Amino acid sequence: MKIRKSEIVVFVLILLCFIIGIYFYPRMPDEMASHWNAQGEVDGYTSKAECLFIMPIMFIGLELLFIIIPRVDPKKENIEKFRKYYDIFIILFFLFMLTIYIQVILWNLGIKIMPNIIVLIGFGVIFFYCGILCENSKMNWFIGIRTPWTLSSETVWDKTHKIGGKLFKIAGIVSILGIFFQKYLIFFTIVPISVVAIFTIVYSYVEYKKETK
């Protein structure tokens, strides 16, 4: 089984998380701030062992999932056609998660970087790149806008992903603009992506009905 460069990069990022966690473990309070509300206020605490190591352990599971998907998909030959975009998405995703991990540690060291800024920018970048991924994706069972109608017609798949890609990019830009309205974080993240999801589901259905007629 061929090991891809993206898998090596992610492995290094996960290893870096463990190294950071081990290094900072003695310096952390027994109960670490680990969750913030929409206003950027701490509303949850976790033991330092759980806070420092649960996330890296979860990363391992996620990376295994990302590795398995292209290898078990019945249409894996299609995934290979846009594999480089998929690999970049994985790296961006783990860089985002690493940034959140570091923000948690810095906050508990007294360096209070607002999580809202990181979340808004991070989601913005991820959403925008999802648009690029959608525009280049080919029909498969795991990656992309998977509805009964996109999975039943390559034409519907292509049309839905073309318009969905543009909408994801817009959602990404809206999310980043949310840094100017941090108190309304949820509206700049959940609302745009929800609108995209609902629109693409309805759009794929309408396009499929047109095709079947």
Image (tube, helix red, strand yellow):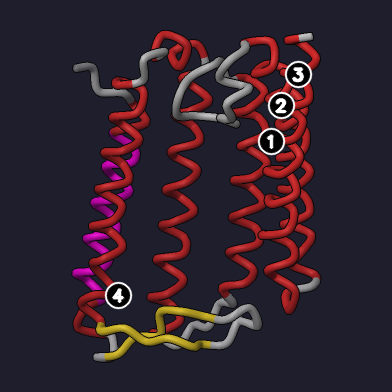
Provide the secondary structure element on which disc 1 rests.
helix
Graded by Cα atoms within 10 Å as few (under 14), some (14 to 19) or many (20 or more), the crowding at tag 3 reads: few
Q: Is residue 197 above or below residue 105?
A: above
Closer to the eye: label 2 or 4: 2
Q: What residue is drawn where x is 50% and y is 11%? A: 81
- Give the residue pinned by disc 2: 204
**Amino acid type assigned to the residue bearing label 1 in the image:** Ile
Provide the secondary structure element on which disc 4 rests.
helix
Q: What residue is drawn where x is 65% and y is 62%? A: 120
Q: How far is mark 4 from mark 1, CA to CA?
A: 37 Å
Graded by Cα atoms within 10 Å as few (under 14), some (14 to 19) or many (20 or more), the crowding at tag 4 reads: many
- Give the residue pinned by disc 4: 51
Q: Earlier in the sequence, mark 2 or mark 4?
A: 4
Q: How far is mark 1 from mark 3, CA to CA?
A: 13 Å
Task: Give the quadrant of residue 170.
Answer: top right
Q: How far is mark 1 from mark 2, CA to CA?
A: 5 Å
CB under 8 Å between discs 4 and 1: no
- Give the residue pinned by disc 1: 201
Graded by Cα atoms within 10 Å as few (under 14), some (14 to 19) or many (20 or more), the crowding at tag 1 reads: some
Identify the magenta region: 8-24
- Give the residue pinned by disc 3: 209
Residue 111 x/y as whole percent: 49, 83
Quadrant showing the N terminus: top left
Q: How far is mark 3 from mark 2, CA to CA?
A: 9 Å
**Amino acid type assigned to the residue bearing label 2 in the image:** Ser
CB under 8 Å between discs 1 and 2: yes
Q: Earlier in the sequence, mark 3 or mark 4?
A: 4
Provide the secondary structure element on which disc 2 rests.
helix
**Amino acid type assigned to the residue bearing label 4 in the image:** Cys
Q: Earlier in the sequence, mark 4 or mark 1?
A: 4
Q: Nearer the viewer, residue 182 or 203?
A: 203
